[in-house]
Image (cartoon, rainbow, N blue to C red):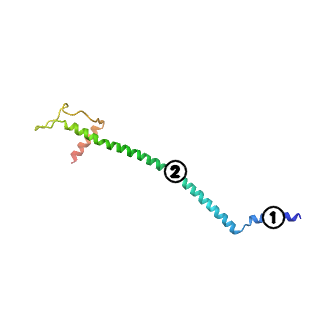
């Protein structure tokens, strides 16, 4: 009787290592499926990260578009103010004169002129080439 349990254990060990080919194929299929699912998970995580970055860029783009729309909506007012200021200038008579400081309208916009000499030299150089 003592040989029977030993034989039973040995036959059990043989059955686990010598599985049927269908079962081995199924296990291998499931392992391949698991690898594919892991790859899909990693690719999905990378895509989610890219989508979040894209969402941030689109939010920035949207904010910039709103700022540009605000600036463009103000141009009408700027041009109207320039037109109003220009309308008050006296029309030059037959003699061509430079308007004096008292005749010019009040300055509407102050533009930094730190680069003005370089820009003027560039403009004069372009005029000489023509």
Q: Which residue is mark 2?
A: 49
Q: Position of residue 50 (x, y in %)?
A: 50, 51
Structural distance between the alpha carbons of marks 2 and 1 = 53 Å
Residue at 47% across, 49% down: 55
In this view, 78 is above or below 38: above
Left or right: where does residue 110 sit relative to residue 96? right
Q: Are marks 2 and 1 in contact (CB under 8 Å)?
A: no
Vertical comparison of 34 with 128: above or below:
below
Taking depth in this image into account, of 130 and 50 the one nearest to the observer is 50
Q: Count residues near mark 1 (Cα–Cα under 10 Å), then give few for <14, some for 14-19, many for 20+.
A: few
How many labels, in total? 2
Q: Secondary structure beneath disc 2?
A: helix
Name the disc covering residue 10, or none: 1
In this rendering, position of residue 48 left or right of residue 80: right
Based on the displayed image, in which of its 4 quarters is residue 73 positioned?
Answer: top left
Identity of the residue drawn at 28% across and 38% down: 116
Front residue of this view, candidates 67 and 119: 67
In the image, residue 62 lies at what x, y percent?
41, 47
SS of the residue at dot 1?
Answer: helix
Residue 45 x, y percent position in the rendering:
55, 52
N-term-proximal mark, 2 vs 1: 1
Q: How packed is label 2: few (under 14 Cα within 10 Å), some, or many (20 or more)?
A: few
Name the side, left or right, on which 15 lies relative to 111: right
Can you tell which quarter of the image residue 1 is in? bottom right
């Amino acid at each position: 009787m003592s040989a029977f349990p030993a034989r039973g254990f040995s036959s059990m060990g043989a059955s686990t290592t010598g599985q049927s080919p269908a079962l081995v194929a199924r296990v291998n299929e499931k392992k391949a499926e698991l690898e594919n699912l892991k790859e899909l998970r990693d690719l999905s995580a990378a895509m989610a990260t890219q989508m979040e970055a894209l969402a941030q860029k689109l939010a920035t783009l949207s904010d910039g578009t709103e700022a540009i729309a605000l600036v463009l909506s103000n141009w009408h007012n700027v041009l109207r103010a320039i037109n109003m200021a220009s309308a008050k200038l006296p029309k030059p008579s037959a003699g061509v004169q430079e308007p004096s400081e008292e005749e010019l309208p009040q300055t509407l916009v102050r533009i930094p002129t730190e680069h003005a000499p370089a820009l003027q030299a560039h403009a004069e150089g372009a005029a000489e080439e023509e």
